[in-house]
Amino acid sequence: MSTDHQRFHYSVTCHTDDEAVLFCLRALCQFAEEHPKRQIGWGGTKTPEWRDRHGELALRFTKPDFRTRFLREAERLLPGKWRLVRQSDNDPAHPQRPR
């Protein structure tokens, strides 16, 4: 696993039944994170993966403050459209592309 992916180990798992909200949550993940490779944080959350997980998606951040920023903005902008399932401080991102 790359060092960049290992840095993204503060996760939040969310649930939504709305595909448009899925895309909004992914965008908020990118907004909240400051690492140059922000897309790592929402890796593995494409629509087919989200459907396979019955509406759940895991988003990852390099710092707990970025995760908190995400949660604050998601609640402010999308109240009642999603719910928090769990959080972890030890849930690193995994590369999505084969090497």
Image: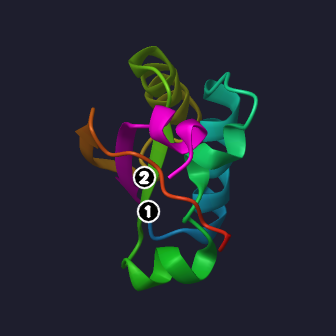
Name the foreground residue: 24 vs 10: 10
Residue at 60 percent of width and 66 percent of height: 96
Q: Position of residue 26 (x, y in %)?
A: 63, 50
Which amino acid, mark 1?
Thr
Q: Position of residue 99 (x, y in %)?
A: 68, 70
- The residue depicted at 55 percent of the width and 27 percent of the height is 73
Checking the image for residue 82, the label placed there is 2
On the picture, is 83 further left or further right than 77? Answer: left
Identify whether 73 is placed above or below 27. above
Q: What span is colored magenta in the figure?
A: 1-15
* Residue at 42% across, 84% down: 52
Location of residue 89 with respect to 15 vertically, above or below: above
Magenta region includes residue 10: yes
* Magenta-span inclusion, residue 89: no
Secondary structure category for the residue under label 2? loop
Q: Which residue is mark 1?
A: 16
Q: Residue at x 69, y 30 (%)?
A: 31
